[in-house]
Image (spheres, rainbow, N blue to C red):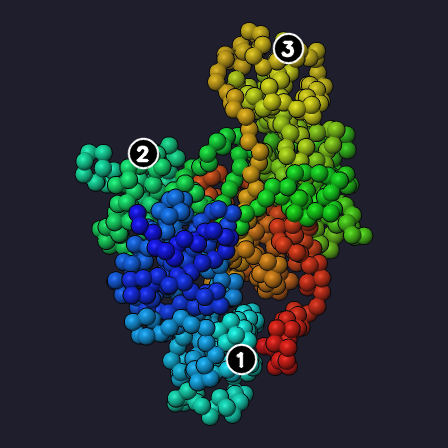
Amino acid sequence: MVHHKEFETAGKEDGLQVWRIEKMNIVPVPKALQGSFYEGDAYIVLYTRERSFYLHSWLGEKATQDERGAAAIFMMQLDDHLGGSPIQYTEFQNEESKTFLGYFKRGIQYKKGGVASGFKQVVTNEANQKRLLHVKGRRNIKAKEVDMSWDSFNTDDCFIIVLGENIFHWSGSNCNRFERLKTTELAIDIRDNELRGRGKVEMIDEGSEPEEVIKVSFYFDKHTDVKNCKDFSDASGAMKTTVVADKNPFQQNMLSMSECYILDNGGNKKIFVWKGKDASPDERKAARTAADKFIKEKNYHPNTQVMWPSGAETMLFKQFFFNWLDKDESTGPTKPFITGRIAKVDQIPFDASKLHETAAMAAQHSMVDDGSGKVQIWRVEGKDKVLMDPSTHGQFFGGDCYLVLYSYNTGGREKHIIYTWQGQKCSRDELGASAILTISLDNSMGGVATQVRVTQGQEPPHFVSMFKDKFLVVHLGGTSREGGQSEPGSKRLFHIRQSSTKATRAVEVEPTASALNTNDVFVLKTPEALYLWKGKGQTGEEMDAARYVASLLGGAVTEVEEGEEPAPFWASLGGKKAYQTSKTLQMAVSAPRLFACSNKTGRLIAEEVPGEFTQGDLLPDDVMILDTGAQVFVWIGKEANEAEKTGSAKIVQDYLDSDPSGRSGIPITTIKQKEEPRIFTGWFHAWDAKFWQQDFEKLLKQHIFEILGSKVSKLH
């Protein structure tokens, strides 16, 4: 395929490249103007990071059909030029994806006009330009050019008035203070980039407009109060589309490398086109036509997004499949969970001696320290908790719930974590009681503890590390109450595995040969014998834990090498069966996702923070949800209201329950503003412990002052 000369530099360096469609040609957009889009135009946007490509076409609501068609052609050319590897998106004005918005941290501008109207995309310092921008959004900032009339204003929002080299940031009397801050940043961006630093920014409040604004009047009149998967193939000689499955989650093995598929999520104005690497050239070229035809046949909105994930599947695509596996990825307890976010997270090897130096390590491995702090454990009995004898620490039973209080020192302060461990076979009453008792225990310590819900089988690494040479042993079924414990089975099989943080646990599983794993060690107890089975990939630490479990079970130990099992061993497990023999891959680090839970609009919603987030995205009047793949954090701002605090818990649970990858039982950690542990702060670049020491209003005012370098008016 012929490539446009402008694509010769495409993807050569990390970063953002933007091209505008001009008379069936493409013209690069200067970096100073990236983020501004004319409503009557179409654009091509390429984001490159470490040879991963994210390719977008952006279509203005007034773009012509010719411009839309040209954008599709140039998208195909650029995709082909980059070897077919880019993840592709179709973006529409006002309906951009989170990924797209994340490229423009200071927001995007919608400008009137376009190529057909004679508007040129040049950096300007015109002294006579007059524009009014309506700014909306707390995080996904969008500025739309509106008519220069008082009728365009309202008291709830912020506006930017551009009069030549004078830029006025106008704040309505009821505007949100965070929108106010973001509007200031956008005004500065206009001054520094569009006007090349020659402009002057001034902040004005509703009702205090300066004479020069009133005089020019902008022609002001009066001030008023203002869901299936389809395969398309040419195997029969004619291109045809066939329904493969009509209900998700789908099975990954439905996708053949020699075919192309359409995944229908049109109800959410999105469809995905997946192109197998062995599909014919005709099928791959026909993908765009097939997608457009499919949208028309289904009578979907013409602005339905088309995404092309093949070869670099995003989490948005994978979520429709049950337990999606990437290339060479194995299944099992250490199965990686990877999202298709732009941010790349480099894995940091675990080193306990450097935990207090490296917050990113603490975060990735969920380790606040090496587990050597003070441990107290209570078992839930009825509506009360009973303190456990230290000699029993580390042993848990599936029919119980426990509260585990961990205390440690960091930075000269004592901090606390309350783990609420919930067995798989505990009663509903015990589940409810454990939650109430956790809150009560936290309140007794002044409400400063970090709370972590732990379900059996999903224990985080730090929880496992607390038991040291006693190890963590989870018994299958029964309860640990004196006199109430059910009798263990005559045959018991324990699976011993070491985590990436060197913490080792033993979990009782069903005594069957299919439960074995070549990477680990197993202990089998029968009435006649006690076996210690050593997989080929086992470690010395796993062997130590296995011997500890064997000592608890009692009896003479017979060590068995994998591949040299005696006949009685297989007979005890119901006969020899296939089990996992592939090597477990190193745990992949999940790129995190941050959501804000807010009811500022009148109903509680969760909005994802686009792009690479920062500490500044944690707003004190919201509840935030941080999903790191292996666990979920709920961060409670000091000014969050009760509806946000209580409602966010349901949002988190619904979010996990609806995840087809099966993460409903992963740890949920609740933390409070200013009490953030390192396992949380390590996910943020350059975390500042003093960030919230000042009154937040003063902090915002100081931030704006530093940007403007001049006196600012009172913040609302």
287 lies left or right of 78: left
Disc 1 crowd rating (10 Å Cα; few below 14, some 14-19, many 20+) is many
Is residue 223 something that shows in the picture? Answer: yes
Q: How far, Cα to Cα, is label 1 from label 3?
A: 85 Å
Is residue 309 something that shows in the picture? Answer: no
Front-most of 594 and 458? Answer: 594
Q: Residue at x 67, y 30 (%)?
A: 504
Q: Quadrant of the C terminus?
A: bottom right
Disc 2: which residue: 258
Dot 1: element: loop
- 677 in relation to 487, above or below: below
Amino acid carrying label 1: it is: Gly
Residue 545: which quarter of the image? top right
Disc 3 crowd rating (10 Å Cα; few below 14, some 14-19, many 20+) is some
Q: How far, Cα to Cα, is label 2 from label 3?
A: 52 Å
- Label 2 vs label 1, nearer the camera: 1
Disc 1: which residue: 199
112 lies left or right of 462: left
448 lies left or right of 460: right
452 lies left or right of 582: right
Disc 3: which residue: 529
Please identify the residue farthest to the right as the structure is shown: 412
